Amino acid sequence: MSAFTFKELAEPKAKHTFSVYKSDDDERLVFGWANVAVRQNGEEVVDLQEDSIDPDDLEAAVYEYVLQFGDGGEEHNPSRRRVARLVESCVFTPQKLNAMGLPEGSVPFGWWIGFRVLDDDTWAKIKDGTFRMFSIEGTGRRIQAAEGGEES
């Protein structure tokens, strides 16, 4: 069902894609990691564009996304917006793990999501493996971390 377990996410690797974890076909629900900022071992994750995100910034961005949008699209295509609706969203942080009684390091610091897929074509692509992961779309400021926060 999944390409990476929590344990595998903790292992340092150069690149990861975060697979969709499929659920009940009748419900058309898909779940998975939209973003992992820090692995269980404390290592910061660098994405395919060589970017990373601070967990606090990720949490703020997620809340804004949920409040403003809450829908899923297809491959960042504006004409394919709203093919799915957000049904679950949780940003795991040290504070939330503590509140849940989970020890730090039991799951990565990241954004777990779930969508109900409304579009027949999109659901077919999920089922046949064409779509295997979530991808975050958005804009932001790129800041050089190694140079003390100067914008680039």
Image (cartoon, grey):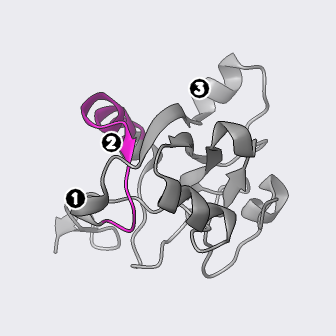
For disc 2, the neighbor class at 10 Å (few under 14, some 14 to 19, many from 20) is some
Q: CA distance from mark 1 to mark 2?
A: 10 Å
Residue at 34 percent across and 46 percent down: it is 82
Q: Provide the secondary structure element on which disc 1 rests.
A: loop
What is the C-alpha distance between the residues marked 3 and 1?
25 Å
Q: Is residue 103 above or below residue 6?
A: above
Q: Earlier along the polypeptide chain: callout 2 or callout 3? A: 2
Disc 1 and disc 2 in contact, CB within 8 angstroms: yes
Q: Position of residue 27 (x, y in %)?
A: 67, 36
User: Residue at the spot x=67%, y=17% of the render?
Assistant: 99
Residue drawn 51% across and 54% down?
Answer: 120
Residue 140, label in figure: 1
Magenta stretch bounds:
59-76
Q: Splitting the image into 4 quarters, where does residue 4 fall?
A: bottom right
Q: Of circles 2 and 3, which is in front?
A: 2
Furthest toward the left, the residue is 151
Identify which amino acid the numbered label 3 is placed on: Gln
Q: Which residue is mark 3?
A: 95
Dot 2 corresponds to which residue? 61
